[in-house]
Image (cartoon, grey):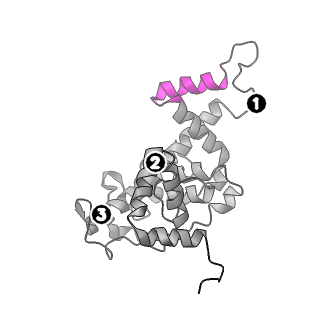
Amino acid sequence: MRNEVFPVAYGDLEAVGGASGICGPEWLWPVKHRPFRPLGVCPVVQTVGSVPCERFDDLVDRSVELVRVMTGCQFALGDVALEIAPLRTHGGNMALGEGEELGVADSLRLFAEQIGLSFHTMRTYRWVAARWPKDQRQEGVSFEVHRILASTPDAYELIQHPPASERTGRRAWSGDAAKRAAGWSTATPVTVEEKVEAIRDLAQDEQVAAQAACDLLHRPEVAFRAMRDRYPDYGLAV
């Protein structure tokens, strides 16, 4: 079965390989066949991890297609789950009629068990698919980003305006970018505010806070700046 918004069917040359027919088992075709490839990291570094930067860019390029296909599969499964158990008002987990039909939760559990997935995974796929009608799902944006942005105000408008990456300047969604837009904490703090928030979270542990304070005392210039910012002289210094 083919998802109407994110086609994933094998042999769909236009959706996967383009009209030129670059498809099939050789889906890992060379970069030259994908002009939409975003700017890589080669101008910045020579190696990434254990691979040369050219190889890294090639692997990223190939993985973009994998994520696109995976996103289509996740939405397709969510749509199937919605067909089996449509969203209902509060109380939808109760059985229907005279008890002859399974409730929503039991139906999803049975479906998830039959296809080898967890109930939690299937419930998430179903919820995200319901939050994003087919005509609002954005091609080239991962399922993860759709999931994160699903509960934001004006999500349909927001997803159409990806932020610029601080590293590359390219406008594209990432998991962390979506979390920032949704007001969530990010896995990798980038801005000063995010780093401070991460430190605050860690400093809730008294041992961590005590060690951080001791380290601060060994950096007098930082301690002085902190005190100056917290207690300004209001122009009274001579």
Task: Please provide percent x and percent y for residue 198.
Answer: 50, 55
Which residue is more in the foreground, 42 or 75? 42
Q: Is residue 199 above or below residue 84?
A: below
Task: Please provide percent x and percent y for residue 28.
Answer: 32, 57
Residue type at mark 1: give it: His
Q: Report the residue at 63% width, 30% height from top.
A: 84
Task: Please provide percent x and percent y for residue 35.
Answer: 41, 71
Measured in 3D between alpha carbons, the distance from the residue under mark 2 to the one under mark 3, in whole angstroms, is 20 Å
* Residue assigned mark 3: 56
Quadrant of the rendered image containing residue 59: bottom left
Lower sequence index among marks 1 and 3: 3
Q: Report the residue at 39% width, 59% height from top.
A: 215
Q: Is residue 76 above or below residue 183?
A: above
Which residue is more in the foreground, 220 or 115? 220
Residue type at mark 2: give it: Met
* Residue assigned mark 1: 90
